[in-house]
Image (tube, grey):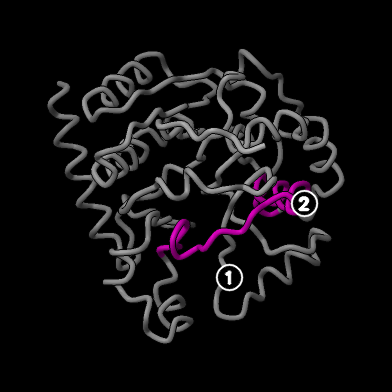
Amino acid sequence: MKQKKSDTIEILVTIDQNYIKPLEVMMYSMKLNNMEQNFCIWLIHDNIADSALRNLTKYGEQIGMQVKTVAMNNNIIFPDSLLNLHDYPKEMYFRLLSGQVLPASLHRVLYLDPDILVINSLRKLWELDLAGNMFAAAVHEGLTDIMSSINNIRLGTTTGYFNSGIMLMDLDEMRKKVKIEDITAAIEKNHDTLILPDQDILNYLYGEDILKIPETLWNYDARAYSVYLARSTGNCNIEWVMENTSILHFCGKPKPWQKEKHSRFKALYLNYQQMTNRILMQQK
């Protein structure tokens, strides 16, 4: 049975306080390039200060977005195995467990990492038919896709290695299938081989339930311009990206807001950051 798509695009983010500034930039880029759309931002967090949440909600109102916050620590108790793995923050698991804490009236969300720019419409992704799958996500394939083969061996999977930074999520299916006990057991079993814990767990447990979407449209790795250009025999150039790509993802480190040298898209990010800061100055 097909779900009715909401006119409002429901966005999920799961961050700690350190990523509020990048989130503000992401939100502004999303609104600026989707002016006709209504957005609701769902922020699942652990211990972000109330004052920071109020400021973020006020900022959302300024740019025409609703912000709703959900405290995960009021809903789920995390076992130690999730908290102690490679010193990664537990917020990374919130996206997988979001079905348990978001309202039952919410049937799908679009999860977005905060280290992205939205530079074109999100409507087609939001309305994508998941064809019975629980998630839709992209694979960062590179020129030869060697990493997917390595990850298949490492995790014992058979699909491509999906990136968890941008995912369309069927919350109804997640409420039926995603269990914290399964995640905990998978971490304990694969503790020594996990590299990116939440992403590894996504692929290990749910890889067969993910619909593959084009990375150049919906999860463009900003580090890999030369790879995309070569793979497309010159077609996927800057002009193509600006016209066709909806989500630029600043994967890995350094991040574009840091002083270190970054990709050719850093100047674009800094421009959105500058515009965001001007809006924030109006709050003061």
Q: Which three-letter amino acid code belongs to the residue tagged 2?
A: Tyr
Q: Main secondary structure of the magenta part?
A: helix
Residue 265: image location, x then y, percent? 30, 63
In the displayed structure, 176 sits above or below 196; it is above
Q: Specify the segment rendered in magenta.
A: 195-222
Residue matched to label 1? 141
Q: Image quarter for residue 8?
A: top left
Residue matched to label 2? 204
Residue 178: image location, x then y, percent? 75, 34
Q: Image quarter for residue 30?
A: top left
Horizontal side, residue 63 vs residue 98: left or right: left
Q: Residue at x 30, y 68 (%)?
A: 264
Asked whether the beta carbons under mark 2 and mark 1 sit within 8 Å of each other, the answer is no
Q: Residue at x 65, y 51 (%)?
A: 196
- Lower position in the chain sequence, tag 2 or tag 1: 1
Q: Image quarter for residue 76?
A: top right
In the displayed structure, 111 sits above or below 268; it is above
Residue 102: image location, x then y, percent? 58, 22
Question: Which one is nearer the viewer's eye here, 49 or 203?
Answer: 203
Horizontal side, residue 1 vs residue 158: left or right: left
Could you say whether the residue bearing mark 1 is in a helix, strand or loop?
loop
**Magenta-span inclusion, residue 209:** yes
In the displayed structure, 111 sits above or below 98; it is below
Could you say whether the residue bearing mark 2 is in a helix, strand or loop?
helix
The quadrant the C terminus occupies is top left
Q: Which three-letter amino acid code belongs to the residue tagged 1?
A: Glu
